[in-house]
Amino acid sequence: MKTPTPHLPQRSRRRPRGFSLIEVTLAMGISAMGISSVLGLLPQTLDQLKKATDVTAETRIHQQIISAVGQADWQDASGADALGYNYNGRRYYFDTMAQEITAQRMAESGARETLAYVAEVTVDSNGFALPGGSADPNLRRVTIRVKNSRLPSFDFDRENTVNYRRYSTLVTRTGR
């Protein structure tokens, strides 16, 4: 005959809920390392963004000035156009969007509030000689120096050349 066995409480078959303290601590440590790595890259990313913005604006400034100088009908060796306007040594001022700031606009709003870039143009007075040839009076080398500066009196000659960008372009007389 079978003897009855006393009834023992059954163990619960449910799994424990939640995470252990060790698991939570490890997850927080891994998350903290990931977040600090991303935050560590943020200053470098912002610096690269600033440099890319400057290069883009300075290139646009260069194109605007070369367009103006290239369309001029030079009458003499100094780079003066038919109206006597001389581009050699001229300064241009631009805002953060690379739009030219005229003298009137500077006077109205104040140079320190809107000025972002200063550019200076130098036109070689002699014709440019291509390799194997003599100097061509219809060619001029135009050098444009551009600096991200809020000072309208920025001195390119006293500043180290690594502190501004220098663009040299050959421009030909249009023959208009």
Image: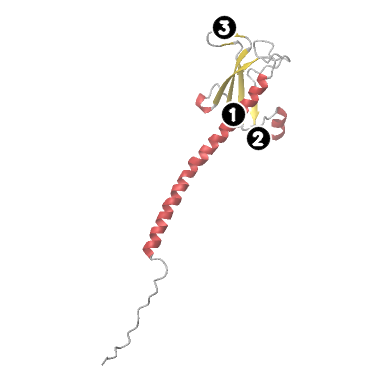
Say which mark, if any, is on residue 114. 2
Q: Position of residue 18 (x, y in %)?
A: 42, 68
Which amino acid type is shown beneath numbered disc 2? Thr
Label 1 secondary element: helix
Spatial distance from mark 3 to mark 2, Cα to Cα? 45 Å
Q: Residue furthest bottom?
A: 1
Say which mark, if any, is on residue 134. 3
Mark 3, residues whose alpha carbon is within 10 Å: few (<14), some, or many (≥20)? few
Label 3 secondary element: loop
Please indicate whether residue 21 sits to the left or right of residue 105 in the image. Answer: left
> What residue is rendered at 45% in x and 51% in y?
35
Check contact, mark 3 vs mark 2: CB within 8 A.
no
- Which is more foreground, mark 3 or mark 2? 3
Q: Nearer the viewer, residue 124 or 171?
A: 171
Quarter containing the C terminus: top right
- Which is more foreground, mark 3 or mark 1? 3
Q: Is residue 117 visible?
A: yes
Which residue carries the number 1 mark? 59
Q: Position of residue 82 (x, y in %)?
A: 72, 14
Label 2 secondary element: helix
Q: Earlier in the sequence, mark 3 or mark 2?
A: 2
Q: Is residue 91 visible?
A: no
Q: Position of residue 171 (x, y in %)?
A: 62, 17
